[in-house]
Amino acid sequence: MPPREPMFLECTECGTRYYRTTKTMSTLKQGQKIEKMKFCPKCRMHRVHKERKK
Ligand SMILES: [Zn+2]
């Protein structure tokens, strides 16, 4: 089983943590920060969400 690191995706605009995700093996190797466009319920629009450890 590959190691998985639980984390949150935080809205860069308002800081709302609405999504939970896990880092995959390949992402860990590259040392990249996860950045995704997700719908933020507080901003009521799509925002860039960045990974944040809990
Ligand atoms: Zn937001």
Image (cartoon, helix red, strand yellow):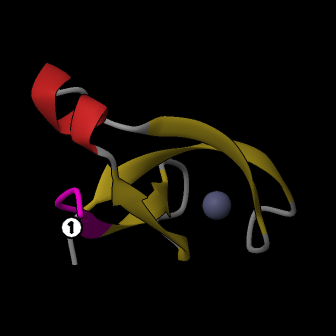
- Decide whether the magenta segment is chiefly helix, strand or loop: loop
Eyeballing the image, is 48 above or below 44?
above
Give the percent coordinates (x, y) of residue 13: 54, 50
Whether the magenta-drawn stretch holds residue 4 is answered as yes
Residue 9 appears at what percent x and percent y?
A: 46, 60
13 with respect to 15 (left or right): right
Residue 27 occupies quadrant: top left
Residues 41 and 31: in front is 31
Quarter of the image where one finds residue 47: top right
Crowd band around label 1 with a 10 angstrom C-alpha radius: few (<14), some (14–19), many (20+): few
Q: Nearer the viewer, residue 6 or 2?
A: 2
Relative to 51, say whether 8 is above or below. below
**In this figure, which residue is indicated by the disc labeled 1?**
53
Q: Residue at x 58, y 38 (%)?
A: 36
Q: 6 left or right of 22?
A: left
- The residues colored magenta run 1-6
What amino acid is labelled 1 in the image? Lys
Q: Disc 1 on helix, strand or loop?
A: loop
